Amino acid sequence: DLDTTNWRDIGPTLRYAPIDGKIGETTFTFQAAHWTTKTSGFTGLVLLGIQAVTGIVTVTSATGTVLYTATRTFGNDRFNYVSDEYVLSNWALTDLPSDPTALVHITLLGNLAVTAGWSAVVGLSEMMFGYVADIGDTQYGARVGIIDSSRKETDEFGQTTLVQRDFSRRMSAEVMVDKADIPKIYNLLSDFRATPCVFVGDESADYSPTIIYGWVEDFDVVIQYPTQSMLSINIKGLT
C-alpha cells in the first residue's frame, strides 16, 4: 500500500470488496462464498447486493456454541428469465447476539445443481455491521425508487446518445413513533445528519428494496395523536 512507485490503488481485490464501504464493487465466485469475522458486539448486520439462491448466517461463541442462526432463500421466485440472472437482493438482520467475542459466519450459495450459468454464480456487494436503533414502525404507503445519473449528450453533428451512469436509491416513508420516543428519535436523526447509515424500512424479503445505505435528506415529526406521532423521513442512498 505504501509503495506508490510500483503500485497504484485502483480498487479493492475480490477478497476485500465486500468491506470497502462502496456498493459499486461486487465480489463474484462460483457456487459458494463464505466469510467469518468477529461481531465485536454489534447487533446489526446487513448484506447488500446479494446474488445467490440461499443465504445462511450463524453466530457462534468463542467455544463454538451456536448462539444464532438465520436462513433466507433468494431462489427461483427471484430468477429473471429474460436476462438469465438472479435479481440482486438485500438482507438485514437486526437481532444478532451482542457477545463481543462471538464469530459470525456468512455463507451464500448458488445453484449447486448446475456447473455453468448465472444461477451458479454467487455475488455480494457489501457487508456492514453496526448498532441497531429503532425509530418506529414503517407505515404502508412508503415509496422507494432511484435517481438516475445517466446523461443525454448531443455532439456537434446533432447526434444524441444516452450515456449510462450509476444511480442512487431513495426512500420516503411515514413512521409511527410513540410519544415517549419523540425526543430520542429527533435527537438521534439530528446527530446522525450527513452520516452514512443503513436504513431498514422492512426486513422481509419481499420489501428488501426498503433497505438502503445512505443518509437522511430531511425529516419532520407531526404531533398527530395523543400517544403517537408520525415521522416523515426521506432517505437518499449513496448508491
Image: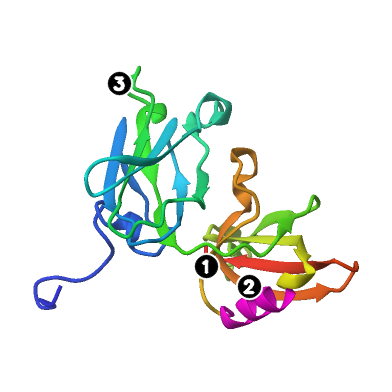
Q: Residue at x 63, y 52 (%)?
A: 210
In three-dimensional space, the C-alpha distance between marks 1 and 3, rounded to whole angstroms, equals 38 Å
Q: Give amino acid for label 1.
A: Cys
Q: Give amino acid for label 2.
A: Val
Q: Earlier in the sequence, mark 3 or mark 2?
A: 3
Give SS at disc 1.
strand
Is residue 30 visible in the rendered structure shown here?
A: no
Q: Residue at x 37, y 37 (%)?
A: 108
In three-dimensional space, the C-alpha distance between marks 3 and 2, rounded to whole angstroms, equals 43 Å
Q: Are marks 1 and 2 in contact (CB under 8 Å)?
A: yes
Q: Is residue 238 above or below residue 77?
A: below
Of 73 and 116, nearer the camera is: 73
Mark 1 = which residue? 197
Of 68 and 33, nearer the camera is: 68
Whether residue 186 is in magenta: the answer is yes
Mark 2 = which residue? 216
What secondary structure prevails in the magenta region? helix
For this view, does 85 lie left or right of residue 216?
left
Q: Position of residue 146 (x, y in %)?
A: 64, 58
Q: Position of residue 56 (x, y in %)?
A: 40, 36
For the magenta stretch, what is the residue range? 182-193
Mark 3 = which residue? 115
Q: Viewer-nearest of labels 3 and 2?
A: 2
Task: Choose top left, top right, bottom left or bottom right for residue 110.
Answer: top left
